Amino acid sequence: MTTQIFMASTLYGTATLAAALDTECFRPASRRILLISNNAATPETAPALDEMPGFEQLRSRFDDVISWNETISPFHPGGWSPRMDDVVLWERYLRLLWNLGDDDVELAVESIQVHPALGFTQIFTGAPVTVYADGLMSYGPTRNKIDPLVGTRIDRLLHLDLVPGLKPLLLTEFGVEAEIVPTDAFVKVLAELVETGDALPAIEEPALLLGQYLSALGILTAEEEEDLHVRMLKGAVALGHTKVVFKPHPSAPARWSRGLEKEAERLGADLTVLDTPVLAEVLYQRMRPALVVGCFSTALLTASALYGLPVARVGTSTLLDRLAPYENSNRVPVTVVDALLPELGDKAAVASQKPGLSVSDLNRLVRAVGYAMQSKIYPSLRPEAESYLTKSLNAHTLRYFKRRRLTSLGLPGGIPVQLAFIPRNATVRRVARRARSLKRATLG
């Protein structure tokens, strides 16, 4: 007897699992359990996955639905893991609680680098693990060094083909092979969710703006994120779009929408702010947007790759500069969107929708950035990173790297070793400021 346990925290991730199951990406099993984890900062005030519109359409793929939050209560899923001495006790407890008996167990989780997935996989010590990815982070490096007792049990990475031809870097340090969830199957599953948008206003071919709530991640301030939304609106209107729909992040404060509404009134645009919590892909099917605008949301790539909709990005240059530390796991998603999609202010690029980079060049860029982010996890990528930086580093591609990081790794493009002391030398900086001041005074 085999029981498969699928841990999920989002409707998008559950739809990915549904498509994988529909196309037999998982072998037959006696029982399939969907283990729901509500990872919101305050789970008590945020709807769980099984309470979201559209969940019932996906529910039939699983025999049972169990709450991880209830299982480990009162602990938070994002901050709890079993003590190593208690792992055996936890496995016995879960087998009894979930009626697993002596079944062989197979696990499928997302974001294996962090909890709750990491803690959960540590409990079933002998179980094989499938990692599934529903976003752009699968193309980047593993964010943390994973315990080999977990990493060596991962047999594959299931992912959506959001950037055809781009190879995931995630988990390759363990020799994990990437496997694509068939795109047509995923689109078919998303079509099952169309009815969840019945309460949406009937708007045809608007410009759709996607909010991400980046200030909650500490990347932007609240004021900067409000300004980012206004830039999206102004850019869409400048391209001739008079009907605009804004899909705010579910956790974003309502006052942001009010500020956007005032700007729309000033610009003479017909703005609709959605308050119905549906996937962006439901909007794509019901509204067929004339343009989808966002920062670095995965939904930009699903719009382009899965639905053939025109897309444009805003604010990625700021994020590339702001993301800290350099190994921030959002860096590769931002890099991919910045390198691939047209900038909203570039009218010709938005009209042509021509990719900014070829797939081969994008692969080289991502692997170089991945090495710079996690050189200790991926030492074998150093020759590729050196080759890319030697041949392709210029004023434009430097935006994807930091000179300080290149210097610390001894990579091409860094500050020469004999000059590396300059940025840290207070006297040199003071003299440089004085020289610039005198130059301005002379020219003035």
Image: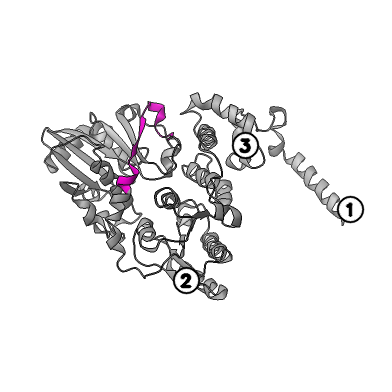
Image point 55% across, 24% down: which residue? 383
Residue 87 horizontal side relative to residue 410, left or right? left
- Relative to 339, say whether 125 is above or below: above
1 and 3 marks in contact (CB < 8 Å)? no
- As shown in the figure, which amino acid type bears the numbered disc 3? Arg
**Mark 2 and mark 1: span between their CA atoms?**
51 Å
Upstream in the sequence, badge 1 or badge 3? 3
Q: Earlier in the sequence, mark 3 or mark 2?
A: 2
* Residue located 39% across and 32% down the image: 171
Q: Callout 1: 10 Å neighbours few (<14), some, many (20+)? A: few
Quadrant of image for the C terminus: bottom right
Specify the amino acid type for callout 2.
Leu
Crowding near pointer 3: few (<14 within 10 Å), some, many (20+)? some
Q: Is residue 162 magenta?
A: no
Q: CA distance from mark 1 to mark 3?
A: 33 Å
**Which residue has dot 2 on it?**
271
Q: State which mark lies toward you, 3 or 2.
A: 2
Is residue 441 in sight in this rendering? yes
Looking at the image, which is closer to me, 432 or 223? Answer: 223
Disc 1 residue type? Thr
Q: Horizontal and vertical percent for residue 162?
A: 42, 44
Residue to which mark 1 is pinned: 442
**Residue numbers of the magenta segment:** 168-186
Q: Quadrant of residue 206?
A: bottom left
Location of mark 3 (residue):
404
